[in-house]
Image: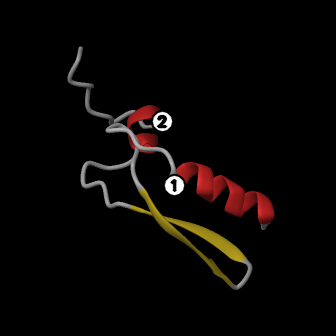
Amino acid sequence: MKQFVAEIVSMGNLKHKNIVPLLGYCRRKGELFLVSEYMPNGSLDQYLFHDDKPPFSWH
């Protein structure tokens, strides 16, 4: 748990236009969750690992 909290503190200090803001975290029934701002255009995972990904705008 200490390492998780240390990571959260580090992530909470990151401020950049291309980084999704970390709003908080939750621990419930032994599971740890990160809470971030909602991003309406989908996840980075969708763009990197799925064949049906739309092209990036800088192409």
Type of the residue with mark 2 = Phe
Query: Which residue shows up at 27% across the image and 25% down it?
Result: 56
Of the 4 image quadrants, the one containing the C terminus is: top left
Q: Residue 38: x and y, percent?
A: 32, 61
Instruction: Specify the quadrant that holds the N terminus.
Output: bottom right
Dot 2: few (<14), some (14–19), or many (≥20) neighbours within 10 Å?
A: few
Residue lying at 51% horizontally and 49% vertically, measured from the top left = 13
Spot occupied by residue 10 in the image (x, y as percentages of width and height): 60, 49
> Eyeballing the image, is 58 above or below 46?
above
Q: Is residue 13 above or below residue 30?
A: above
Instruction: Give the label, 2 or 1, closer to the camera.
Output: 1
Confirm or deny contact between disc 2 and disc 1 (CB under 8 A). Answer: no
- Quarter of image, res 17: top left
Give the residue at x 50% y 68%.
24
Place of residue 29 in the rendered image (x, y in percent of width and height, measured from the top left): 70, 85
Mark 1 highlights which residue? 12
Most distant residue in the top direction: 59
- Marks 2 and 1, how far apart in space? 26 Å
Question: Quadrant of the rendered structure where residue 40 is?
Answer: bottom left
Relative depth, front residue between 29 and 19: 19
Q: Left or right: where does residue 40 sit relative to residue 37? A: left
Q: Residue furthest bottom?
A: 29
Q: Which residue is mark 2?
A: 49
For the residue pair 2 and 48, the one nearer the viewer reads as 2
Q: Amino acid at mark 1?
A: Gly
Residue name at image x 39 percent, y 49 percent: 20
Q: Could you say which disc has been placed on residue 59 in the image?
A: none
Give the class, few, some or many, for how many residues have Cα within 10 Å of label 1's Cα (few <14, many ≥20). few
Q: Secondary structure at mark 1?
A: helix
x, y (%) of residue 19? 40, 42
